[in-house]
């Protein structure tokens, strides 16, 4: 199984003072100063003892000042951020932040890593990370996040508040660790696809045993010329060497082109709330609901199919479109090709207008004139007329094997199935049932024309697409 790695690079920076002064008193100092008011109690009987409070507070302030002067300046600290793995949806990513203290005093640091909402749950409160940094010994600490949105995002700085073990004063620093991080779709590992890989291997062995000679255009062997052979199949170089006519013999192609077509229009912007993860070990946003867009689910299904198809020896291409063509990648093989495809999928963005389906169909017809398998992931618009995506699918069916996937909306299905309790719910249920019936009719008509159709909730798309691909391979439909 091809499993590329997309680690963000390590970023390291020297700290700089934060704020005009970059220095402050701690809560411990304030408590000691407030404790000086206890000297006012004996001052009720002897007024001269009241001055002991001022002497005590002055002593505390002097100790805090001396303690702050002992702290190393911000330039003596160097911070770094490292990533353990590529950040992707529905997976935990471990981040390691480290502090190197070039001063001569042990410091206790509280670190706050400024990460955008795309990398962590914005509703969760991130507590500062505590770490003790000894002189000239790097101190590091790790924490986990779970990305929320796919695409490029920029991290912020690392904010550091550090004090000595005495803890009377502290300094504030900031390490500019800004970097661009790309969040990828769900990246399936080989262990998660063992069933599909084993079935693909079995299908490949069966096709090798039952392959037919003379069909297709994959070269298989040479043989003597027989009457009735096509003159275009004669190998003239081999005929010249042997002194007699030699014919090329072909076999059915075992490596076909698979195109993944993804609609990035407005219909793919709607989000689907997944069930909470009860086994999450995240310190932040544990058990929170995950809401991914239909486009996120489409990208995840595309990655899984690309991995399986490349493992099976097929060539995989990509076409993502909205009003214009967002990404285009001609069919290819290999780990580098898969890496390029995943990079392109991570950059897809859902548009606010509906996609131009007919433009994508025309472009695909020019890019792939030969018969191939096309996975088209989209959704059906609720219009009085027949949606354009159906017309585009009809055009592709004339030449290609089409696997048409329409992503349903679970909320609409739930409204259509519920029992209304009042007039408003009755109208809502009737509208949802009408939408579901029209959708079912469009899918059925497309299926009658020879397309392989799926109308599923987004969470079930990936496994169904992989099963359909293996069925197409098993039946040698392309």
Image (spheres, rainbow, N blue to C red):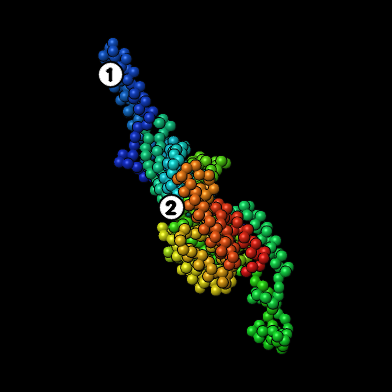
Q: Quadrant of the C terminus?
A: bottom right
Task: Name the outermost residue toward the bottom.
Answer: 243
Q: Which residue is mark 2?
A: 153
Disc ID at residue 187: none
Q: Say if 205 sits above or below 92 in the image.
A: below
Residue at image position (61%, 58%) is 466
Q: Quadrant of the N terminus?
A: bottom right
Label 2, label 1: how far apart the Cα atoms are: 58 Å
Residue at image position (70%, 80%) is 222
Q: Position of residue 381 (x, y in %)?
A: 47, 59
Residue 416 seen in render: yes
Q: Is residue 71 left or right of residue 132?
A: left
Task: Name the outermost residue toward the left.
Answer: 47
User: In front: 112, or 318?
Assistant: 318
Q: Which residue is mark 1?
A: 51
* Front: mark 2 or 1: 2
User: In front: 122, or 381?
Assistant: 381
Other-residue count near label 2 (Cα within 10 Å), few / some / many at <14 / 14–19 / ≥20: some
* Mark 1 secondary-structure assignment: helix
Q: Position of residue 37 (x, y in %)?
A: 32, 20
Q: Position of residue 231 (x, y in %)?
A: 66, 86
Q: Is residue 206 left or right of residue 83?
A: right
Residue at image position (72%, 69%) is 210
Q: Is residue 129 left or right of residue 252?
A: left
* Mark 2 secondary-structure assignment: strand
Q: Say if 397 sits above or below 291 in the image.
A: below
**Quadrant of res 370:** bottom right
Q: Say if 83 sits above or below 249 in the image.
A: above
Task: Name the outermost residue toward the front.
Answer: 423
Residue at image position (35%, 43%) is 17
């Amino acid at each position: 199984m091809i499993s590329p790695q997309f680690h963000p690079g390590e970023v390291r920076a020297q700290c700089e003072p934060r704020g005009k002064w970059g220095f402050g008193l701690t809560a411990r100092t304030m408590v000691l100063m407030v404790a000086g008011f206890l000297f006012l109690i004996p001052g009720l009987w002897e007024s001269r003892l009241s001055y002991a409070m001022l002497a005590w507070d002055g002593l505390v302030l002097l100790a805090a000042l001396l303690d702050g002067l002992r702290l190393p300046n911000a330039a003596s600290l160097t911070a770094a951020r490292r990533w353990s793995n590529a950040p992707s949806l529905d997976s935990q990513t471990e981040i390691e932040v480290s502090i190197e203290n070039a001063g001569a005093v042990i410091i206790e640091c509280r670190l706050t890593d400024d990460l955008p909402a795309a990398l962590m749950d914005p509703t969760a409160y991130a507590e500062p990370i505590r770490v003790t940094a000894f002189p000239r010994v790097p101190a590091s600490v790790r924490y986990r996040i779970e990305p929320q949105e796919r695409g490029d995002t920029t991290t912020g700085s690392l904010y550091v508040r550090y004090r000595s073990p005495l803890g009377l004063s502290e300094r504030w620093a900031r390490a500019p660790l800004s970097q661009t991080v790309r969040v990828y779709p769900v990246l399936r590992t080989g262990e998660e696809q063992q069933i599909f890989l084993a079935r693909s291997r079995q299908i490949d062995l069966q096709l090798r045993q039952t392959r037919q000679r003379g069909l297709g255009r994959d070269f298989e062997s040479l043989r003597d010329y027989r009457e009735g052979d096509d003159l275009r199949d004669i190998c003239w170089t081999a005929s010249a060497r042997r002194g007699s006519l030699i014919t090329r013999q072909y076999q059915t192609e075992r490596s076909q082109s698979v195109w993944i077509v993804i609609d990035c229009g407005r219909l793919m912007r709607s989000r689907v709330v997944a069930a909470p993860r009860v086994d999450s070990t995240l310190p932040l946003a544990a058990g929170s609901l995950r809401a991914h867009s239909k486009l996120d689910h489409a990208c995840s299904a595309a990655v899984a199919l690309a991995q399986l198809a490349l493992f099976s020896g097929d060539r995989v291409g990509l076409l993502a479109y909205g009003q214009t063509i967002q990404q285009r990648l001609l069919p290819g093989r290999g780990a580098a090709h898969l890496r390029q495809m995943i990079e392109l999928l991570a950059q897809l963005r859902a548009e606010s207008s509906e996609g131009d389906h007919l433009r994508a169909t025309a472009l695909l017809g020019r890019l792939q004139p030969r018969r191939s398998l096309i996975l088209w992931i989209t959704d059906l618009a609720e219009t009085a007329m027949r949606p354009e995506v159906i017309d585009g699918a009809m055009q592709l069916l004339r030449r290609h094997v089409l696997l048409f996937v329409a992503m349903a909306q679970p909320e609409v299905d739930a409204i259509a199935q519920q029992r209304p309790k009042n007039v408003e719910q009755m109208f809502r249920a009737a509208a949802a049932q009408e939408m579901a019936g029209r959708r079912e009719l469009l899918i059925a008509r497309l299926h009658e024309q020879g397309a392989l159709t799926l109308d599923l909730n987004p969470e079930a798309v990936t496994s169904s697409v992989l099963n359909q691909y293996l069925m197409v391979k098993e039946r040698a439909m392309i």
